[in-house]
Image: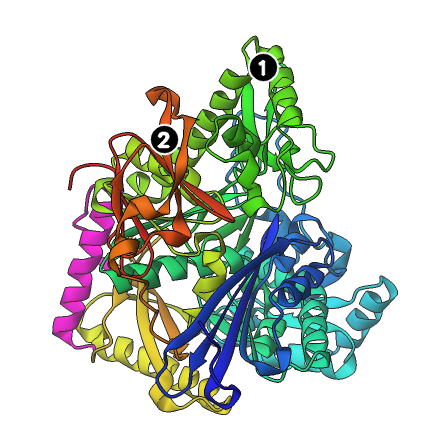
C-alpha cells in the first residue's frame, strides 16, 4: 500500500525487547480519517547487554525516518535483567528506628519445607547499609513521634564512604501518612543531589511492611541503570532526528512517559509480557471474544494470563525468583497477573543424573541460539525438535533468512536419545511433549486453579512459538477455539500501540463494610481521582482523554489476605455497598469454592487512571474470491509428525495469501516468516476479516 503524503500521515512505532529477539511494529495513519495506511513488522536479534543496539538495528532494518515518528512506545527487559543478574546500583536503606531488619526477617513461608538448612533469600541491601532515623507514625497516619533529622548528615556520609549511589527511604506506616517520608527524601536529595533517591510512597500506599520495603529497595537498586538506559535511548533517538512522544510500557498493562518510568522504574519489571496480554484483550474486544486465555511463547519463556469479561487481571502480589526452593522477592506494584515459565523456542533439552529428560528453563538465547542456527549451539532446543518433526520447514527457517543445519540438529538429538536409550525422532517427540506439559501446567495455574473453566475461554496465542503449540495445548485442556493474530510473532509490540497511559493509585484503609461506610468509600475514590486527574493535567492531557477504573481488596473479618474485585464508577451509596458485598461473596466462592457468614472488611482502594491514546481502526484484509479460496495459498504438501496422531501428509499454506473467509481442515501447517501454525487432524481453520486465524479445536 503506498505511503500517505508526509503532511497527512503520522508514524507510530513500538519495540519489544525479548530474551532472543527484538520486535518492532510500525504503522502510518491518516490524521484525518484515522485509517492505517501501512502496518509493518521487523524482527532482529536481541543484543545483550547493550539492548538499545538491537532496537536501533530494528529501526534501521525497517528503514524508518526517525524524524517522522510521532509516537514511540518501548518495552524493555532492562529492569528484570538488572535484578536477576544483580547488576543494579549499590543501595542503602533508611527506615524507622527499630525496623532495619525487616528485609532480613521477611516472611515465615519456606517453600523448601523439609530442608532444615533452608536459608531465606539474601536481601539486596546488606545490614551494614541499612540505617535508621527516629520517627513514628501510627497505622492511622497520626504522628506519634516527630521526625528527627539530626542523623541525616552522618547517614549520608556513611553511605558515601561505602560507595552507595542509590538510597531507598521506607518509613513505618508511610502508606497511611507519607509526611515524614516526603521530608526525609527531600532532605537527602537536597544534601546529596547526585544520589538516586526513591521513597516508598512514590511507588505504593499499600500496607505490609516487608513487601513495601523490599519493593522500595528494588526500585532504588535499578533506578540508576534504568535511568541511564532510557536517557541513552532518548539521546540516540533524538540524535537521529526523533522529536515525537517517547513512552515506556509498564507492568500494569499501560504505557507511561519516560520521565515517570525513570522516577519509579520498578513499574517496568514485566513490561514486555504485559503488553502482549493488553493486546490480547484489545483483540478479543474487537472480535467479540471477552473471555480469553492469552498465551505468549517466545524464544526464552512461555507466559500466560486470563482475561475475564474484557478485564485484564492485575495483582500487586508479584514475585521474582520464586521457586520450589526459594521464597523469592515480593514487588508490590500493580502487575498484569502472568504466570511465566522457562519454556520457549530456545529452551534447552537435557538429561539429569537419573536419565530423565527435561526441557528448560535454561535457554540457548540469541547467541549461540538453537543448533539449527549453525552458530555453535550443540544442545538441542524446542525449536530444533519442531524442525525434526517437520513442523518447521528447514528451507523456510525464519522466513528463509537461515538455512537450518539439519545435520547438526539430527546429531544433537541422536546424542540426546543415546543418553536415555531412544532414537533421535522419539527424543524430539519427547522434547515437544515435555515442553507442552510444562505449558499446560502454567495454563492451569491461571484458569482451573483460580476457579475458571478453560472450556469457557478462547485462547489467543502469539509470540514466535505460540502458534506452534497452541492447538495441542487447547486440545488437552478442552479449550474450544484458538485464535492466532495477524503478525503474531510481534504481537506484544503491537499491544503497546493499543495501550493507553496508565497510572495506579493504591491506598490501604481498612474498615468494616456497612451502609455507614458509603460516604467514606465514595470520598476516598473521589479524592484519588482528583489527584490522578491533576497529575495528567500537569502533563497537558485533556480532561476528555482521562478515565478511571476502580477496584477494591476485600476480605472476611478475621482473615489475613484479600480478594480484588472491580467497583463501578458510580456514586457509592448504601445500596451500592450491598451490591459490592454480594460481588465479593461471589468472587470469593469462585476462587475458593466456598463462602463464609463472617462480616466483610474493606482493605485497600485501587484506582487505575488512564489517559486515552488515539487508536486507529484496523484495516480489513482482502475479501475477493481468489483470496477466499485456500487452494490459492497452498504451497504444497509434506510429511509432518503430529505426535499421537502419527506422521501424515499435511497441506502447507502461505499465510500471507489467505484472505478473509478462507476456510480449510487439518492436518495443516500455516507458514509465515517468523512463525508457524500447526493444525492437527480433526481441527478446522477460518480466517476473519482482520487476518486472524480461528482454529476450532472442539465442537462449539
Q: Which label belongs to residue 417?
A: 1
The reply to whether the magenta stretch includes residue 584 is yes
Instruction: Choose top left, top right, bottom left or bottom right for residue 92.
Output: bottom right
Residue 18 image point, x, y percent? 58, 53
Magenta stretch: give its range: 572-600
Viewport quadrant of the N terminus = bottom left
**273 left or right of 572 in image:** right
Q: Is residue 141 above or below residue 50?
A: below
Instruction: Choose top left, top right, bottom left or bottom right for residue 224.
Output: bottom right
**670 left or right of 248 in image:** left
Q: Which label belongs to residue 27?
A: none
Q: Give me the residue at 64% from left, 48% from top.
A: 104
In front of the other: label 2 or label 1? Answer: 2
Specify few, some or many for label 2: CA neighbours under 10 Å numbering under 14, 14-19, or 20 or more. Answer: many
Residue 294 image point, x, y percent? 37, 50
Q: Foreground residue, 579 or 22?
A: 22
Instruction: Choose top left, top right, bottom left or bottom right for residue 98.
Output: bottom right
User: Which residue matches tag 2?
Assistant: 650
Q: Foreground residue, 140 or 74?
A: 74
Q: Is residue 591 above or below residue 11?
A: above
Q: Give me the residue at 65% from left, 59% from top.
A: 78
The reply to whether the magenta stretch includes residue 353 is no
Amino acid at each position: 500500500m503506498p505511503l500517505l503524503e508526509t503532511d497527512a500521515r503520522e508514524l507510530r512505532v513500538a519495540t519489544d525487547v525479548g530474551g532472543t529477539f527484538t520486535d518492532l511494529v510500525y504503522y502510518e495513519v491518516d490524521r484525518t480519517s484515522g485509517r492505517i495506511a501501512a502496518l509493518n513488522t521487523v524482527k532482529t536479534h536481541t543484543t545483550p547487554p547493550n539492548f538499545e543496539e538491537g532496537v536501533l538495528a530494528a529501526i534501521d532494518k525497517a528503514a524508518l525516518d526517525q524524524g517522522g515518528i510521532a509516537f514511540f512506545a518501548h518495552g524493555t527487559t532492562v529492569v528484570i535483567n538488572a535484578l536477576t543478574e544483580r547488576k543494579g546500583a549499590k543501595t542503602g536503606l533508611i527506615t524507622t528506628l527499630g525496623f532495619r531488619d525487616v528485609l532480613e526477617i521477611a516472611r515465615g513461608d519456606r517453600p523448601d519445607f523439609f530442608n532444615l538448612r533452608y536459608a531465606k533469600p539474601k536481601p539486596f541491601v546488606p545490614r551494614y547499609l541499612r540505617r535508621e532515623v527516629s520517627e513514628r507514625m501510627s497505622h492511622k497516619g497520626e504522628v506519634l513521634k516527630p521526625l528527627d533529622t539530626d542523623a541525616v548528615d552522618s547517614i549520608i556520609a556513611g553511605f558515601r564512604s561505602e560507595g552507595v549511589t542509590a538510597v531507598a527511604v521506607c518509613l513505618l506506616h508511610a502508606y497511611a501518612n507519607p509526611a515524614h517520608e516526603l521530608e526525609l527524601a527531600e532532605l537527602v536529595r537536597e544534601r546529596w543531589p547526585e544520589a538516586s533517591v526513591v521513597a516508598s510512597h512514590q511507588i505504593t500506599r499499600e500496607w505490609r511492611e516487608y513487601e513495601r520495603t523490599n519493593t522500595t529497595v528494588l526500585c532504588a537498586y535499578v533506578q540508576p541503570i534504568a535511568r541511564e538506559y532510557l536517557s541513552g535511548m532518548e539521546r540516540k533517538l533524538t540524535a537521529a532526528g526523533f522529536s515525537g512522544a517517547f513512552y515506556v510500557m509498564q507492568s500494569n498493562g499501560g504505557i507511561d512517559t519516560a520521565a515517570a518510568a525513570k522516577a519509579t522504574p520498578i513499574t517496568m519489571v514485566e513490561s514486555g509480557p504485559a503488553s502482549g496480554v493488553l493486546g490480547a484483550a484489545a483483540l478479543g474486544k474487537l472480535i467479540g471474544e471477552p473471555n480469553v486465555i492469552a498465551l505468549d511463547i517466545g524464544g526464552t519463556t512461555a507466559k500466560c494470563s486470563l482475561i475475564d469479561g474484557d478485564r485484564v487481571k492485575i495483582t500487586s502480589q508479584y514475585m521474582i525468583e520464586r521457586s520450589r526452593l526459594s521464597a523469592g522477592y515480593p514487588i508490590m506494584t500493580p502487575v498484569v497477573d502472568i504466570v511465566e515459565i522457562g519454556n520457549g523456542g530456545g529452551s534447552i533439552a537435557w538429561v539429569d543424573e537419573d536419565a530423565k529428560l527435561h526441557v528448560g528453563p535454561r535457554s540457548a538465547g540469541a547467541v549461540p541460539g538453537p543448533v539449527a542456527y549453525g552458530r555453535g549451539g550443540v544442545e538441542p532446543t524446542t525449536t530444533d525438535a519442531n524442525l525434526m518433526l517437520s513442523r518447521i520447514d528447514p528451507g523456510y527457517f525464519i522466513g528463509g533468512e537461515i538455512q537450518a543445519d539439519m545435520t547438526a540438529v539430527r546429531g544433537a538429538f541422536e546424542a540426546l536419545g543415546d543418553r536415555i536409550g531412544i532414537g533421535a525422532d522419539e527424543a524430539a517427540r519427547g522434547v515437544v511433549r515435555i515442553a507442552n506439559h510444562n505449558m499446560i501446567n502454567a495454563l492451569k495455574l491461571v484458569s482451573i486453579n483460580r476457579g475458571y473453566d478453560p472450556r469457557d475461554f478462547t485462547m489467543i496465542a502469539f509470540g514466535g512459538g505460540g502458534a506452534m503449540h497452541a492447538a495441542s495445548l487447547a486440545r488437552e485442556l478442552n479449550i474450544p477455539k484458538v485464535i492466532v493474530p495477524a503478525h503474531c510473532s510481534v504481537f506484544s509490540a503491537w499491544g503497546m500501540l493499543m495501550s493507553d497511559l496508565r497510572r495506579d493509585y493504591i491506598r490501604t484503609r481498612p474498615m468494616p463494610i456497612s451502609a455507614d461506610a458509603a460516604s467514606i468509600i465514595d470520598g476516598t475514590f473521589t479524592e484519588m481521582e482528583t489527584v490522578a486527574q491533576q497529575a495528567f493535567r500537569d502533563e497537558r492531557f485533556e480532561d476528555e482523554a482521562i478515565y478511571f477504573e476502580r477496584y477494591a481488596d476485600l476480605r472476611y473479618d478475621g482473615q489475613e489476605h484479600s480478594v480484588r474485585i472491580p467497583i463501578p464508577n458510580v456514586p457509592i451509596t448504601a445500596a451500592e455497598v450491598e451490591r459490592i458485598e454480594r460481588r465479593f461473596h461471589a468472587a470469593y466462592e469462585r476462587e475458593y469454592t466456598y463462602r463464609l457468614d463472617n462480616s466483610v472488611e474493606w482493605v485497600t482502594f485501587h484506582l487505575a487512571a488512564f489517559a486515552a491514546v488515539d487508536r486507529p481502526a484496523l484495516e480489513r484484509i482482502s475479501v475477493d474470491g481468489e483470496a477466499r479460496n485456500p487452494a490459492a495459498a497452498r504451497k504444497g504438501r509434506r510429511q509432518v509428525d503430529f505426535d499421537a496422531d502419527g506422521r501424515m501428509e499435511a497441506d502447507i499454506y502461505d499465510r500471507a495469501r489467505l484472505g478473509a473467509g478462507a476456510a480449510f481442515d487439518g492436518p495443516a501447517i500455516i507458514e509465515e516468516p517468523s512463525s508457524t501454525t500447526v493444525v492437527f487432524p480433526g481441527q478446522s481453520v477460518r480466517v476473519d476479516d482482520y487476518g486472524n486465524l480461528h482454529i476450532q479445536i472442539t465442537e462449539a
